[in-house]
Amino acid sequence: MSENGSLSPADVERLLTDRSAENRAKTVEKIAGNLVANEFSDKERAEAEEIFRVLASDAEILVRQTLADTLKNLPDLSHDIAVSLASDIADVATPMLTFSEALSDQDLFDIISSKPESHQAAIAERSIVSEAVSEKLADTGNKTVVAKLMENEGAQISEETFEKVLDEFGDDELVNAPMAKRSELPITVTERLVTLVSDKLKEHLVSHHEMSPAMATDLILASREKTMVGLLGYASSGELERLINQLHDNGRLTPTIILRALCVGDMDFFETALSKGSEIAVSNVHLLVNDASGQGLKQLCKKCKIPQGVAEMMRVAVDVVNELEYDGDPGDRERFRNHVIQRVLTHFEDRFDAENVDYLISKIAEHDSNSTEAA
């Protein structure tokens, strides 16, 4: 560098001919640092970038590493330099792939398609990963890369990509554990995760605690349904419909989960679930549910093959839910649920004396079972 800070031909010559990789790396760091600090004129910047183009192919890894590490946070770095460094070996490419904003999604697509796991993993750790790049990373089928993507809260991931990942890696804790810890997940994805975890827990209960498969299934089913009902308040109308379709298609839209949703006042879930089971439009289901004679709901439950005891419970719960309102204070959903259950229990006080819906559901199931056997 000359005294006025510009790059002279002698500076360039020394940089390109010095045989010491360490010396060249120090010079690179100094020049690149000045560029990053915006201390160059347009002419000096152009001179510096010409040097970087040559050094991006330097035989010494240390020189290229230093160049990449110094330029990684320069958003307006010349595109060709950024791509050259990002396409290098992992030790050089990683800082560029992880941090550089000079790389476009198309650049990242090309690298994901042509480079090994190390490069893909670096892209998965970028502070922001678009949905399209996330999908491309998921398509690699590389478990380590996908796990890093799931760990990255800055990664934008579509519901379709989540589903694809669950299809391929749903049983693998390396992937499903960080997925479950994400701050936001589509409710359909959450339902599948809960099911996967529950199935694994069931295997553990049967194999380690001498619990019968039937008992373990009942325990897990209750836990899974309570978890899902607790999440319903966060679902949009579109998510709710997709969730109900998913539950129905996989045999998990049970009378008990419909009853649980009703007991927390979720009429949308209740009516949409009955609509799905009866194949009757939701608008018509709403009219039938609120039929003053009670015959509309009775016929809906019959069409949905809901046991008589549960149907009777639903009839009373619908009346209670229509009378009550959320109070808007913290914990109002739980208080609402308790009010509904207590009112329903009062109605059935000669048959049920517990204070929770799990006991009540089990008693209904027991009653229906005994009625069936008697018949």
Image (tube, rainbow, N blue to C red):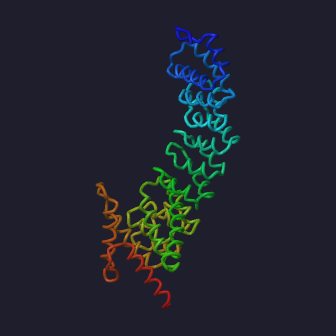
Q: Residue at x 44, y 83 (%)?
A: 366
Residue 219 visible within the image = yes
Q: Nearer the viewer, residue 276 or 285?
A: 276
Residue 250 placement, left or right of 328: right
Q: Nearer the viewer, residue 299 or 9?
A: 9
Task: Give the farthest residue toward the front.
Answer: 20
At a point 56% along the width and 37% down the height, the residue shown is 98
> Is 346 or 190 nearer to us in this picture?
190
- Residue 32 picture location, percent across and down: 56, 22
Residue 80, placed above or below residue 342: above
Which quarter of the rendering shows the N terminus?
A: top right
Counting every numbered tag in the picture gives 0
- Quarter of the image for residue 60 reads top right
Toward which corner of the image does residue 10 lie, by quadrant?
top right
Residue located at (38% from left, 76% from top): 360
Q: Position of residue 27 (x, y in %)?
A: 58, 21
Is residue 238 visible in this depiction of the protein?
no
Counting from the top left corner in percent of width and height, residue 267 is at 42, 62
Q: Position of residue 17 (x, y in %)?
A: 67, 18
